Every structure is written in structure tokens, then in C-alpha cells.
Image: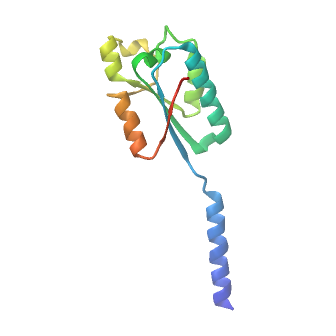
Amino acid sequence: MKYFLFILSLSLTSLNLNSQTTAKHKIVMQLTSSDTLVHKGLLKQLNNLHEGWGDSVEIEVVCHGPGIEFLMKGNTRNMNKINNLKDKKIRFVACENTLKEKKIDKNKLLPNLEYVLMGIAEIVEKQEQGWSYIKAGF
């Protein structure tokens, strides 16, 4: 009887631990467009994902090429929305190769961004680590 109760308690503990763990979704989004309609759609998608999955989703937005304009102080109409998303742990990453190519100084970008040498390489590495890939845009 003791053996049966021991096995039963182990089984119940195992079930309880399994119900407490939640799958963590990891999404890398690529933004290569300077189109403000694409930016608006991206912001809506990011909010929807966070509202739907809360803390069980990890999101990184990689901006390169013309998409770097989304992160520029003078070109974005969405600074407050981006800052709100950063407060929700959504990361915005700027490509240093794009900055170099377009001769854009980092002080022209929004504060508290993350930077990578190559935006496309960041996306490839995330996919190799099992992240889901989404290209922002139409």
C-alpha cells in the first residue's frame, strides 16, 4: 500500500508540474520597409501577440535597410507606441551595417535600442535557434 501511495503522489506531482509550465513562443520579425502603413500594421501585430500570449512570448524586431527609418527619431510617428512595447519586453534591434551604409549616427535613433552588426545574420541565427520568423509588411 505504501508503494501505491508513493507512486500515486509522484504521478500527481508530475501532472501538477506539467500544468504549471507554459510553452514560450519566440518570434523574430523582420522590418525592411519604410512604408508607414507597414509600420502601423507591425505595431498592431506586436500588440496583438503580447495581449494574446503575455509573458509567454518573446519578440525581437530586426530593422534593416529602409526599415531602419521606423527607429529614427525624426521619421517615426510611433515613438510612444514603440516605447510602450519596449516596456512589455519587446526588443527592437537596429542593423549597424545599415547605419554605416546610410551614414546614420546612432544618436538619430530612438534611445535604448539594441544593435547587431548584420540584421539578416541576426534573423538567421534566431531561426537556427528555433525562433519563428515573420516578415512585417504586405
* Residue 5 appears in view: yes
Q: Residue at x 35, y 13 (%)?
A: 105
Q: Position of residue 19 (x, y in %)?
A: 66, 60
In the displayed orientation, state which residue is furthest to the bottom: 1
Whether residue 75 sits left or right of residue 55 in the image: it is left
Asked if residue 52 is positioned above or below residue 38 in the image, the reply reads below
Q: Where is residue 53 in the image (x, y as percent from the top left)?
A: 64, 41
Quarter of the rendering occupied by the C terminus: top right
- Residue at 39% x, 45% y is 128
* Res 44 quadrant in image: top right
**Residue 110, can we see it?**
no
Residue at 52% of width from left, 14% of height from top? 35
14, above or below 137, in the image: below
Q: How is the image coloured?
A: rainbow
Q: Tell me how many marks there are.
A: 0
Residue at 63% in and 30% down: 47
| 84 on left or right of 120 | right
The residue sitting at the front extreme is 138
Left or right of 121 on screen, residue 15:
right
Q: Percent from the top left, x then y, of residue 112?
A: 46, 24
Name the outermost residue toward the top.
Answer: 74
Quarter occupied by the N terminus: bottom right
- In the depicted view, which residue is nearer to us: 42 or 85? 42
